[in-house]
Amino acid sequence: MSYKDKTKPVAERVEDLLKRMTLEEKAAQLCGDLAFNVITDGKFDYEKVKARFSNGHGRITQFSIVGLSDPLDIVRIGNKLQRFFVEETRLGIPVALQTENLSGYPAAKGTVFPSMLNIACTWEPELAKKMSEIIGEESKAVGCNSAMSPVIDVSRDPRWGRTYETFGEDHYLVSQFGINYVAGMQSKGVSCIAKHFLGYSETQAGLNTATTRLNDRELYEVFATPFEAAAKEAGLGGMMASYSEIDGLPVGANKKIARKLLRETMGFKGMLTSDGGGIAKMHRYFNVAKTYKEAGLIAKKGGLDTEIPIGDAYRQLPDYVRAGELDEALLDESVRRILTIKFDVGLFDHPYVDEEKISEAMTNKDKQVFSEKLALKSITLLKNEGILPISQDKKIAVIGPHGDNLRYPISGYTYPAYLEMSSGSKKSGESKKSGEGGAFDQMFAMFSEEQMSKMDDMKTLLAKVGSSTLQEALAESYEVSYAKGCNIIGDNRENFQEAIGLAQKSDVVIMALGGNCGWINVTGGEGKDRARLDLPGVQQELLEVVKKVGKPVVMVLYGPGVFAIEWAKDHVEGIIQAFMPGPYAGKAIRDIIVGDHSPEGKLPVTIPRSVGQVPCFYNHKVGSGYSSQPDPLSATIFSGGYVDEDDEPLFPFGYGLSYSQFDIKDCEVDNENVSLDDGQIVISCKVKNTGSMKASEVIQLYYYFEDARIVRPNMQLAGFAKVELEAGEEKKVTIELPTALLGFYNEDMEFVVEPGGLRLMLGTSSKDIFYEKTIMLTGEKVMLMGKRKYSSSSKVE
């Protein structure tokens, strides 16, 4: 049998196996299931598995939850599960074991990292690669070979609760981080499933899973680009279809998106899976199918390859084939994709895990130090009126709900977040005894009492990995007092007076404010969207009453999204944007405040003044958005802009301050006439650190094509380079921009790059442009579909 011969090409092995499969065996490969259907009382349930999976199976979703108690649990159960599929099913096809992996392998002994939004703040995509290599190594060590990450949605609406899971608002920046994340993870034998295809982050009113109103140009040029880039440049194995609908059809059943755009236009060869319960939503939520079973038929015809978390609709697809309502070839196309991934990650040749090697593969001090480094590099300074860094002879009052909490700086879909979920399950009572309860209860009912008791509580876990709160970290360098002041949400003001009293006794006040994420009592997360961008609860009131004391105030702002903090910008002396830096947030922020490290983060999103400015992203179309100018003929009457708000955002995309200063000079473009025939635009400048400490700056390259016959974005990021400089040091930065990266749909919907004027802009943010030069692109227009490029290159010397 060729499919068992590892010397044969993967395509040949796939075809040999496919021709041997029955309808039921094919359908089984397209189905997911959850671990509670293979485990009883913490142990592998052979009889349950034998009864449920006699035809084989595609994947076990959220399998990493099995490892919440101990890595050995997941290894031993995973090996028994694989042994059943390899040795006791007719064809011996191993099962894929999935995990989330967004900010770390999310179970016991996994390294916890900052949020994806924090990683984007570093503007160093290679750090995402190193991070995902670590996550992939730990996942592979416990038997997980499929990761439902990265999230490469382009997030332009800060009301959407999952913004922190993304790399920000710009498709070029998102593409660079996505490419690197996928390359790192897949190099360790873990296939990535990038999400969410397509336009999931651009839903009506910022609401999760709501309708997506995007035209064909934006769908491809903006939202599909990171997915195509990850596929073409990093070999992305799979994508997850968005819940949301586009033009009346859920994405998974939308042939125009899931077949024409994804397969024909983008040329994607990998798997397209549903999101969790996505097919059931087509029936119960969107009402496009009369039954759940029929929703499976619609999804399969539409282009969706697999169903997760449980494939109860796809299990019934053979009924439609036998009835003549579904072509068997539509099953075959999806089975090929699933089998190809399983062969590619080596699952057929190495289905088992060596439990003797677990301890050496999981988290260690070096990995934790790297997580701390990522946190430090992500911290972004938004305002500094000479208050930072703070001299160590000052008395510090730390005030606010984030000042003494270990959990708040950590993302969702991490080990701590799942422990939080397990704690909720423990408190929910009788689900294990009754066999009833919600999805969370069922998930945790599979554990034995001993396993549940071994799961760390939050404080114990984070203490084990060396986490410290902000006030604990600052106490290493300052005389510190702490007052919570208020909760993150709610209207309790009874602790305001304590906060005021501490502020009066201090030299400087650190206000630790913002939001949190998870599933209960949170300000952001999946299905946790916002109608306002103000500080939650009574935090704004707390900030104002403390500021009235008259002491200098530095605000440290945490959370899964951005906040409109115009009052703070006008009144406090310093603002640090922390987002969700992970378990080492306290140490990282302490290093910034004390001046051991100069801030180097840059915003991957635009921060608006108020929710009324939303959508407020930097690369808006000419004639729209905050940088557009009114028609001079009617400017005296129709001046444009808001009558009750400044047009400009509070902080622009790409913005971030340093403790140092930089002199940028000798900007030049190598050639003012560049051929469109595979041309390269080379632009350079010299950067000197004129300050007194080591620091970093990010040189950002933007462009605007002046001669398009359709309305184009006013500026677009096309390259960047982070340059690290000792005090007094100077380096040259060179960015090479291929013309094949400049493609767009013209007026005839041809994806091209055309001759004409190209305005190049170098800046340290999208607002702070220090050099502009228009060059000419020469030659005939070039059709770029299938030949486009996604990355510029940069050199610092």
Image: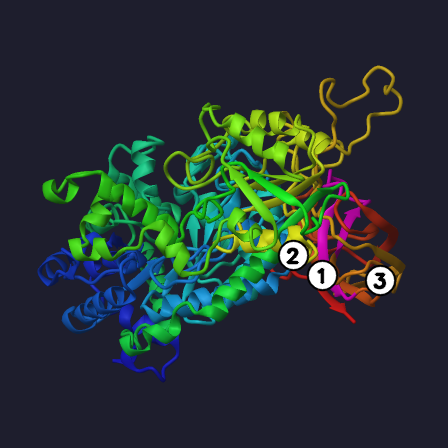
Among the 4 quarters of the image, the one containing residue 328 = bottom left
Q: Position of residue 447 (x, y in %)?
A: 19, 54
- 359 relative to 736, above or below: below
The residues bearing labels 1 and 2 have C-alpha atoms spaced at a distance of: 7 Å
Q: Position of residue 221 (x, y in %)?
A: 62, 47
Q: Is any atom of residue 369 visible in this view?
A: yes
User: Mark 2 against mark 3, which lies toward the viewer?
Assistant: 3
Q: Is residue 705 magenta?
A: yes
Residue 56 is left or right of residue 748, and the answer is: left
**Residue placed at 75% from the left, 69% from the top?**
795
Q: Is residue 386 magenta?
A: no
Whether tag 1 and tag 2 are in contact, CB under 8 A, the answer is yes
| Chain part drawn in magenta | 698-726
The residue that mark 2 highlights is: 123
Q: Is any atom of residue 234 visible in this view?
A: no
Label located before the other in sequence (1 or 2): 2
The quarter of the picture where the N terminus appears is bottom left
Q: Which mark is residue 722?
A: 1
Magenta stretch secondary structure, dominant: strand
